[in-house]
Image (tube, rainbow, N blue to C red):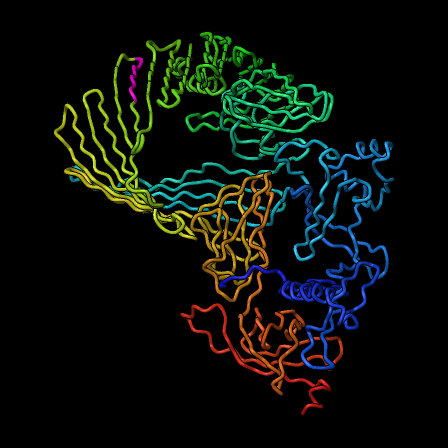
């Protein structure tokens, strides 16, 4: 066995004074002997007396090595005794981690194991509904409660409280009828972690060299994303540097801002460079301040739009919710009215078929309409944004200041209201609208009125009408995914267009230089043909008041699978406002070559357009134990009406290393060639030091596993613990429960993990530490009989010089111990008296670099001053 994840090796050092953790091997052995001893009365006089307080009696006859000697097993009689005190523990309720808090443990009588003292306020915070408990108590189903130290198992029938000291885990099991209803995936804000003070610098550097028609050019790019976290404030900066042959080096400051979340308002405060939300008005970039709702603070089951399912049950009933023939939710409800509010949002909907099955088998069914547009919100949900700042647009010489406010509110399953207002230099706009969920589909309609003062010109004023529609048609399996239409008056301008128009006018330019949109249509229809593939159609149209013509785009496609892979056919037509027309047909196939884990994929693409055609074949895939390598090689043949046949070929590869990502590519043809190389990653500074990693996102974690170099992070491809015991998990989900597992494969056999899985609930932008407890030291199998040749008592404990339990005596005086130094002394104890112990001196051989054994075997002796030893000698 190369790796052990037992937590018992540390139990002795972590257990409080006066308590004992039963070694698993010893526990099994003694339990077996106790059963045998109870069955035979011949040795009844040797059995330890059982106490009335639940102590366990062990027959020690079978543990005697020599007459007159026996192993003291009194310490095992009471199992895992918890001493009174305050412990910081993970609190689990019905298999869900809900809190990390300090809990006081008290003992009913001196010497008894202490139990958790949970106040009524704490239990209510964990989701237990005392109103239901009180109602049952009045009917005689529950015992009276105290507020300070509630005995949950006595108060609630069927409830249990278990404490695992080695895990520091307090597990509560409470019948669901006594729990408050909570949305699926809900994580209480008390668990949201601000993380640690940290900083990071992400980089993306690449160089590109090309040769086309005898002309050489070289380009270089460096993108930077830096961040510093101090407390709950997060500073971010994005910039880039670009250099190319014959051109001056260019530096671009993309964004700089600080951010902090506001839990009570379920929102984010941003100071600096950001973008407005696009829920009501068109999104624009600004420099200033914004507070806006962050839906990620909601449980995943409450994000997006889904209707509330309401009904009535006559008994303890089962409610099933189906969508498109599939069960998406089931639950048990008590008699009376019920509400289901935590359905997961599913695309653009599809009516919900609800079945209520009563306790006697009777059923009743009803349908809840479900279709949504982007503006739809769940009943009772509010979304808002307030922005004040300066418009960011590099084309403007005069950047106006503005303020914007938007508000959305879900009133019922059927209606969502929304609106907002913008005030800027010489510009005012207001919007009001509503979204409706009906049996005919989801509709959204709003009107925006805007007034723009143009220096030197007449004031422009107008309205813009927007209509949206979405519907999933169940019988035909047709999804009208998005259908939107906007019509604007000649005098209507949005904020960005109004700023450009005013800027041109103030510089003496033509106020008509900015195109004023007149109408815009977007439509997408998807049709599932079940076993015969699927078809889609997309249409878009756009035209302006002060520009002739219309931009049109049509596209239709069909895709399906066959025995060996998949294929698709797509046809499109584009007509620009100047009358230019282009057509394109593309046929593509994808076929796996082989059936192994890393079987490559062969892809072909045939593209025929107006005056051009091309054929490309490529083969690509992944390699490596963790798919850390990926590659692609291609060949292309193209021809146009103006050029002869042109052939080219190229290849590219990506390596996701533990501390960076490296890319490279090269291609060549008859008249051109290209080469490029790039590297991207992050440098993270945290309380444990500096760690190199793959490119990190806004929210990430740092693994701390001392001595576990080479352990892999299962949720991040290619990420391993470095020589300092740290690794960076590049991405974590904010406000959700993240489980990060370590795979010990690849670590030294001298490292023992007490835990290989940790959980974290980071706030947006935070850097959380994930600490994994490890024990380092060598493992050895030591045979150490006593000096006279007598065997050591089976089941005796073995401790090191620091008093840490490192093993137990097995057969033939063999001791398997883990976490040893190269040299030292072990003490074997089989009783509480000074004479009931002996010492083993050991010296482990120098460890070979290529050793494949998990432990070393050594021979020694156990020397001591026990009277029996002296008598025999």
Q: Is residue 417 visible?
A: no
Quarter where residue 578 is shown: top left
Instruction: Specify start and end residues of the magenta stretch as a single range.
Output: 570-577
Q: Is residue 276 left or right of residue 791?
A: left
Residue 222, image x, y percentages: 38, 44
Residue 293, image x, y percentages: 60, 29
Please tell me whether residue 672 is drawn above or below residue 803 in the rendered image.
above
Question: Which residue is nearer to you in this view: 138 or 788?
Answer: 788
Quadrant where the C terminus sits is bottom right
Residue 195, image x, y percentages: 60, 47
Q: Is residue 871 left or right of residue 821?
A: right
Specify the principal SS of the magenta part.
strand
Quarter where residue 792 is shown: bottom right
Q: Is residue 638 left or right of residue 770?
A: left
Q: Residue at x 73, y 64 (%)?
A: 39
Q: Residue at x 72, y 71 (%)?
A: 60
Q: Is residue 434 left or right of residue 255?
A: right
Question: Which residue is nearer to you in this view: 126 or 339?
Answer: 339
Q: Is residue 249 visible?
A: yes
Residue 573 among those drawn in magenta: yes
Please tell me whether residue 57 is drawn above or below residue 296 in the rendered image.
below
């Amino acid at each position: 066995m190369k790796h052990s994840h037992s937590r018992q090796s540390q139990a002795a050092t972590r257990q409080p004074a006066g308590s004992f953790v039963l070694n698993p091997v010893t526990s099994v052995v003694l339990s077996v002997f106790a059963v045998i001893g109870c069955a035979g009365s011949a040795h009844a006089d040797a059995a330890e007396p059982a106490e009335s307080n639940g102590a366990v009696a062990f027959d020690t006859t079978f543990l005697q090595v020599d007459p007159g000697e026996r192993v003291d097993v009194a310490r095992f009689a009471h199992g895992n005794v918890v001493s009174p005190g305050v412990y910081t523990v993970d609190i689990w309720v019905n298999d869900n981690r809900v809190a990390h808090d300090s809990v006081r443990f008290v003992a009913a009588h001196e010497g008894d194991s202490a139990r958790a003292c949970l106040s009524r306020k704490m239990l209510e915070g964990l989701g237990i509904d005392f109103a239901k408990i009180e109602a049952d108590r009045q009917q005689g189903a529950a015992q009276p409660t105290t507020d300070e130290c509630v005995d949950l198992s006595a108060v609630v029938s069927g409830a249990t409280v278990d404490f695992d000291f080695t895990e520091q885990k307090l597990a509560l099991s409470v019948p669901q009828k006594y729990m408050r209803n909570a949305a699926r995936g809900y994580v209480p804000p008390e668990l949201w972690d601000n993380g640690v003070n940290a900083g990071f610098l992400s980089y993306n550097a690449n160089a590109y060299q090309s040769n086309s028609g005898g002309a050489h050019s070289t380009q270089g790019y460096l993108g930077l994303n830096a961040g510093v976290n101090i407390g709950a404030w997060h500073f971010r900066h994005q910039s880039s540097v670009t250099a190319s042959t014959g051109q001056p080096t260019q530096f671009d400051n993309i964004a700089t801002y600080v951010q902090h979340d506001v839990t009570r308002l379920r929102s984010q405060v941003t100071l600096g460079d950001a973008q407005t939300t696009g829920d009501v008005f068109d999104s624009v970039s600004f420099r200033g301040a914004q507070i806006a709702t962050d839906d990620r603070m909601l449980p995943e089951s409450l994000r997006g739009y889904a209707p509330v399912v309401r009904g009535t049950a006559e008994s303890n009933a089962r409610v099933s919710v189906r969508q498109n023939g599939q069960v998406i939710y089931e639950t048990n409800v008590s008699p009376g009215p019920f509400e289901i509010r935590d359905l997961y949002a599913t695309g653009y909907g599809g009516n919900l078929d609800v079945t209520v099955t009563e306790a006697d088998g009777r059923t009743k069914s009803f349908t809840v309409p479900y279709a949504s547009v982007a503006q739809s919100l769940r009943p009772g949900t509010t979304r808002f944004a307030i922005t004040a700042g300066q418009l960011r647009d590099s084309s403007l010489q005069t950047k106006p200041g503005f303020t914007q406010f938007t508000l959305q509110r879900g009133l019922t399953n059927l209606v969502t209201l929304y609106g907002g207002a913008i005030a800027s230099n010489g510009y005012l706009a207001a919007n009001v609208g509503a979204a409706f969920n009906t049996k005919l589909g989801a509709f959204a309609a709003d009107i925006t009125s805007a007034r723009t003062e143009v220096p030197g010109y007449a004031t422009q004023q107008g309205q813009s009408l927007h209509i949206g529609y979405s519907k999933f048609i169940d019988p035909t399996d047709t999804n009208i995914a998005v259908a939107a239409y906007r019509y604007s008056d000649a005098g209507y301008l949005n904020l960005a267009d109004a700023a450009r128009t005013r800027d041109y006018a103030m510089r003496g330019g033509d106020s008509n230089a900015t195109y004023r949109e007149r109408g815009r249509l977007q439509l997408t229809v998807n049709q599932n043909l079940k076993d015969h593939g699927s078809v889609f159609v997309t249409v878009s149209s756009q035209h302006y008041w002060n520009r002739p013509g219309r931009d049109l785009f049509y596209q239709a496609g069909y895709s399906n699978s066959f025995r060996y892979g998949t294929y698709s056919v797509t046809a499109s037509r584009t007509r620009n406002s100047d009358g230019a027309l282009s057509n394109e047909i593309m046929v593509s196939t994808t076929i796996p070559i082989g059936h192994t884990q890393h079987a490559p994929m062969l892809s072909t693409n045939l593209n025929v357009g107006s005056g051009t055609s091309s054929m490309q074949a490529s083969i690509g895939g992944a390699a490596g134990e963790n798919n850390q390598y990926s590659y692609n090689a291609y060949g292309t043949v193209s021809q146009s009406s103006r050029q002869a046949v042109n052939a080219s070929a190229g290849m590219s590869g990506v390596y996701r290393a533990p501390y960076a990502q490296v890319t490279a590519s090269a291609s060549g043809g008859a008249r051109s060639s290209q080469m490029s190389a790039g590297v991207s990653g992050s440098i993270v500074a945290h309380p444990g030091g500096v760690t190199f990693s793959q490119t990190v996102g806004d929210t990430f974690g740092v693994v701390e596993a001392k001595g576990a170099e080479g352990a892999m992070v299962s949720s991040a491809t290619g990420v391993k613990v470095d020589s300092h015991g740290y690794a960076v998990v590049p991405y974590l989900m904010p406000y959700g429960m993240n489980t990060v597992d370590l795979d010990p494969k690849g670590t030294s056999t001298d490292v023992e993990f007490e835990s290989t899985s940790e959980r974290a609930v980071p706030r947006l932008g935070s850097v959380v530490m994930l600490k994994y407890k490890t024990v380092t030291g060598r493992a050895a199998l030591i045979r150490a009989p006593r000096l006279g040749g007598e065997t050591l008592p089976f089941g005796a404990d073995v401790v090191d010089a620091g008093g840490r339990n490192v093993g137990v005596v097995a057969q033939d005086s063999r001791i398997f111990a883990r976490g040893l130094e190269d040299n030292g002394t072990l003490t074997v104890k089989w009783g509480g008296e000074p004479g009931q112990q002996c010492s083993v001196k050991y010296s482990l051989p120098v460890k070979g670099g290529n050793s494949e054994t998990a432990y070393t075997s050594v021979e020694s002796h156990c020397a001591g001053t026990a009277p029996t030893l002296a008598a025999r000698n």
